Amino acid sequence: MPHPIQDFNQKIIDEFRAHHGRVGGPFEGGRLILLTTTGARTGTPHTTPVGYLPDGGDRILVIASAGGSPRHPDWYRNLVAHPQVTVESGVFTYEAKAVVLAGEERDRAFARAVESDRGWAAYQEKTDRVLPVVALHEIARPGPPNINASSPGEAIRLVHDVFRRELTLIRKEMAAGGPVLGAQLRVNCLTFCQGLHNHHTGEDVAMFPFLADRHPEAAPALARLRAEHEHIAALVEELREALSGTDLDSVRTEADRLTTELEAHLTYEEEQLLPLLDPA
């Protein structure tokens, strides 16, 4: 007979995979991954839904809260024994190295987590153990990223949806954040900016030349998309500059501008490129 927690987790896992990272219930609208670890004693893989914090660059953070339980969760004990793990974001799947943060680095990261969600503090107050914070460093592999899509067109649409969802979440966090822009919210914004830059660079270097070679008629659309990439990059830099200051209204203004321009760009790109990538 399945354990209630295992049954609950499996329903989330199934929904997560079926809807490319979108789930309802307690995780709706939050940042969630599926973390697959290797059993410390059994050596078998175990997959668990886990909330995460963006941390810039090639890593994200997870907290072994177990809801404030006196014992570390199984997934934490597993990754201490076997640090190589698999991360599913709903769109991307990649291997990562787990590193348990210590000392001041751990404390700063946990403070950012509490700043963005007081629930982490409530979990810490329920237990005598110090809740571990773990960095999951993506292990770079040659070739394109592993996108959970059945076609190139679907891959583009899913990646675009990731940007839409993240920017919507960031704007929601800004609206709820009061008069001060928190450290974690700054990290969220900067992580988003870096991801958008990487995506557009990849399109400019690889996808657009590929399409230009096979579809000369698409040259005007591709030229417009390249120009829009430059415009959006300028908006991203303006948001970065606003984030370096203390004026939350300025940050909101720049985020709103980026949201409006980016949505128009993503829509136009899908209209122009999906028929070329996935012809009927």
Image (cartoon, rainbow, N blue to C red):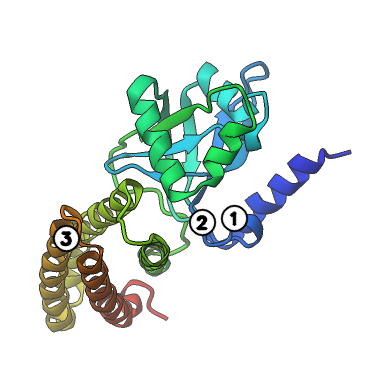
Q: Quadrant of the C terminus?
A: bottom left
Residue that lies at the very extreme toward the front in this rendered image = 179
Q: Earlier in the sequence, mark 3 or mark 1?
A: 1
On screen, residue 11 versus residue 90, left or right, reads: right
Residue drawn at x 49%, y 49% as measured from the top left: 117
Judged from the image, the secondary structure of the residue bearing numbered disc 3 is: helix
Q: Quadrant of the N terminus?
A: top right
Q: Are marks 2 and 1 in contact (CB under 8 Å)?
A: yes
Q: Are marks 3 and 1 in contact (CB under 8 Å)?
A: no
Q: Earlier in the sequence, mark 3 or mark 2?
A: 2
Q: Nearer the viewer, residue 256 or 128?
A: 128
Vertical placement of 19 versus 271: above or below?
above
Task: Please name the amino acid that badge 2 sits on.
Answer: Gly
User: Real-space Cα distance between discs 3 and 1?
Assistant: 30 Å
On screen, residue 81 versus residue 259, left or right, reads: right
User: Which numbered marker is on residue 191?
Assistant: none
Residue 182 at x, y = what percent? 33, 51
How would you rate the neighbour count of disc 2 (Cα within 10 Å): few for under 14, some for 14-19, many for 20 or more?
some
The residue carrying mark 2 is 30
Vertical placement of 72 versus 261: above or below?
above
The residue carrying mark 1 is 27
Examine the image and state in which quarter residue 181 appears: bottom left
Examine the image and state in which quarter residue 76 appears: top right
